Structures are given as C-alpha cells and as structure tokens.
Image: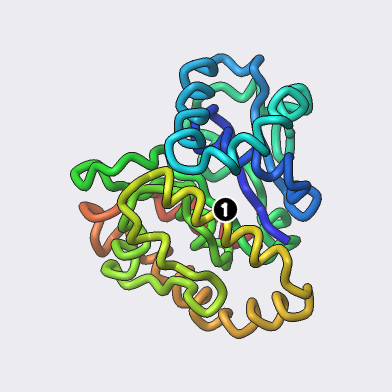
Amino acid sequence: WFLSLNRRPRAHRLALGLKLYADRLKLKGMVSMPSTRYSSDWIPELDIARTLGHRDHLDCWSRLSQALPRFLSSLPWDLDLDIDNSGHTDALTFDSAGASAYRNTYFSVVTESSIRNDADDLFITEKTCKALVNLHPFLLIGHCGTLGRLRHLGFRTFGSLFDESYDGIERSSHRLWRIFDEIDRVCSMDRNVLHDRYEKLLPDLIHNRELMLEFPERREEEIVKIGRASCRKECRSR
C-alpha cells in the first residue's frame, strides 16, 4: 500500500515506526527503519519521541508505548540497503530505493529531516523529491506549510486522496498525530478504491515529475539543489 524510507533515527521517524508496528500497519507497507546499532544519537531522539506523545496525546501514546520494547527489538527494517551500516553519504540520496519500490506501492509517507516549526528553516530535501519523480502521492511529515510551499512552486498536491489540512497545523505533535490519523484512514480503504484514486491522480503526478525534472534550471534558489542527472536516472528506471 505505502512506502516509507527512514534511515537516520529521528524522533518523528521513531514515533511513526512505533505507530506502524503497534497498529500492524507495517504489514501494509514497505518500510525501512534503523535499529539502535545505527551510529547516531538514538537516546535523545527516543526521548523526543516520547515527548511528542506525552505532550498532547497521552492516551494514544500510552497504548502505543506498550509495544515499544517489541518494536525496538524488531529493528532494523531493511528494505533497499543494510540500513544499520549505511552511514551518512550523499550517494544514497537517489541511488537507494529503486523504482520498483514505488511501482509496488500507491503512496509514500515521507519523513523529512525535521518537523520543527521554524519558518526560516523550511526546506525540501531529496526525500520529497524522490516521491515527486517517482509518480507517488504522499503524506509529508515535515515542517508546517511544506505542502503550501510545494504548491507555490507549481507542484500539485493530493487533496483528493488525503486530508491535507494537517499542513497548516503549527504544533508539531498535533500535526504528526493528524498525519497518523490519515495513515489509518487511507490504509483502511478498499484496495480497489485506492487504486482508482491513484489512477485519477496520474495527470497531477506526471505534471509533478516533469516539473521536478526541469526544476533545477528554473529556480535553484527555492528548493534543494538536485542534479538533473540524478533526477533523470530515477525517472528512467521507472
């Protein structure tokens, strides 16, 4: 049903992984997630994830946290590479998770690098761009207003499939849990209905891919600089 690529441990990614594991939604997805063996600041990120739950959604977090030890012991979730030993390298931005992962799923749950509410730090990385290039609608776990920024840049988002009101929620924890609700809703759809919704989105998805491929030479200052060759490599493999 969905694809979610998560390499470096971040609080919002750990919260997503716990949600998917505890509610058995991972069974409907292709999901990568590192284990505690990944060389990174795991403990602080896990503490932040707990804070996201305790702050506004204590009842839900209390239910999910019962599965936390089992979730952690189930990791890593390898998908396109040996994630615990992948390290941090720009070579992974477009070379990992080939087109087949996108072809075999209907939508992505994109986890951007940060969900902080810092308007001066709103940015769009290769995580979002890979979905745009690969004809994927997506739920975006990122900064408040990121979907609005994409629309401003000429991309089309996916209001016919998702309730995108989450993009306007300023409080990070509220926005995250609203997205979790959307994952629940879309994953409970009849598969044929989801397939039909995806097909109806194809004109918009093709528009996004074409815009993404020409984008670096149009407005490099407005989006992360992504080499056209990398974009086209991802496109040609589809």
Q: Residue at x 29, y 62 (%)?
A: 149
Mark 1 surroundings within 10 Å by alpha-carbon count, few (fewer than 14), some (14 through 19), many (20 or more): some
Residue 135 falls left or right of residue 31: left
Q: What is the quadrant of residue 210 in the picture?
A: bottom left
Residue 80 falls left or right of residue 90: right
Tell me residue 27's x, y (percent): 80, 50
> Which scheme is used to colour this image of the protein?
rainbow
Residue 162 can be seen, yes or no:
yes
Q: Residue at x 49, y 33 (%)?
A: 54
Tell me residue 124's x, y (percent): 36, 50
Position of residue 175 relative to residue 115, above or below, is below
Numbered label tally: 1
Q: Residue at x 31, y 58 (%)?
A: 145
Position of residue 59 relative to residue 102, above or below, is above
Position of residue 44 relative to residue 81, above or below, is above
Dot 1 amino acid type: Phe
Tell me residue 215's x, y (percent): 34, 63
Q: Quadrant of the C terminus?
A: bottom right
Does dot 1 land on a helix, a strand or a loop? helix
Tell me residue 100's x, y (percent): 73, 56
Position of residue 113 relative to residue 73, above or below, is below
Frontmost residue, 135 versus 236:
135
Residue 40 can be seen, yes or no:
no
**Would you name the residue on which mark 1 appears?**
180
Q: Residue at x 71, y 54 (%)?
A: 101
Frontmost residue, 15 versus 96:
15
Residue 174 falls left or right of residue 106: left
Q: Quadrant of the N terminus?
A: bottom right
